[in-house]
Image: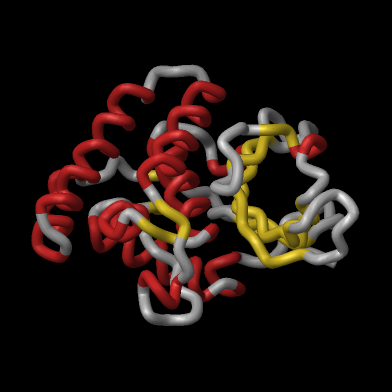
Amino acid sequence: MCCGIVACVALALPEFDRMQQVAAQRYGETAVESVNAWRRLVGEARDLPDEQKLARVNAFFNARVSFDDDLLVWRTADYWATPLETLARSAGDCEDFAIAKYMTLRLLGIADERLRLIYVRARIGGANSSVSQAHMVLGYFPSPADEPLILDNLIRDIRPAARRPDLFPVFSFNGDGLWVAGAQQSSADPTARLSRWRDVLERARQEGLAIQP
């Protein structure tokens, strides 16, 4: 059973100049160009309807970032990268794609209550396969009662959850709470339950991108 929390977060305007400075100092000119492209995306998409924002952001990161395991990219078994880090390396795993899309959509004014990072078991090997692997996607909820639209690095299309029978939700979270599959209420603060989530939020803040109470 989950317990409720009282939390409200809003995404501060990013200091893109700061992020460009960090990109130049740590990663070089190619990373600065990636941050510039990210900045243009945010400027161009800010006034679009939500579904167009989703499409732009999903396509941007799926095109610019190649999937690679954390061991290859970061030389550690499980590392959650900030959007800046992901763009600088042009590589990341499923968590990195989902985090980058989540933070960018918050940046574009989409409310936290409409977004959740969702841990799933993803079936691989076809419809009759019993093999699955851990995976993370981003869900967008048009309203609390609606099924989410799924943003995934595995496929280009944004599809309703009902059209993703290969995904089996385990739990989901955002800046407001954590939900276990099948539960109706938000659980405890995810920054207490998920140390990597707390860590990536803090590192993003230090780079100029902050989610604040």
- Viewer-proximal residue among 134 and 23: 134
User: Above or below — where is 71 with respect to 200?
Assistant: below
Q: How many marks?
A: 0
Which quarter of the picture shows residue 22? bottom left
Asked if residue 31 lies left or right of residue 126, the reply is left
Which colour assignment does the render follow? secondary structure
Expressed as whole percent of the image width and height from the top left, the position of residue 200 reads 41, 65
Q: Residue furthest top?
A: 48
- Residue 139 in sight in this render: yes
User: Above or below — where is 10 with respect to 74?
Assistant: above
- Viewer-proximal residue among 95 and 144: 95
Which quarter of the picture shows residue 13? top left
Asked if residue 161 lies left or right of residue 73, the reply is right
Task: Give the residue displayed 87% in from the left and 64% down from the top.
Answer: 130
Task: Give the residue displayed 61% in from the left and 51% down from the top.
Answer: 137
Expressed as whole percent of the image width and height from the top left, the position of residue 203 reads 32, 66
Task: Give the residue displayed 49% in from the left and 80% down from the top.
Answer: 77
- Residue 5 in sight in this render: no
Expressed as whole percent of the image width and height from the top left, the position of residue 198 reads 46, 69
- Viewer-proximal residue among 35 and 140: 35
Task: Give the residue displayed 53% in from the left and 37% down from the top.
Answer: 111
Locate the N terminus and report the quarter of the image it occupies: bottom right
Expressed as whole percent of the image width and height from the top left, the position of residue 63 reads 41, 40
User: Above or below — where is 1 with respect to 147?
Assistant: below
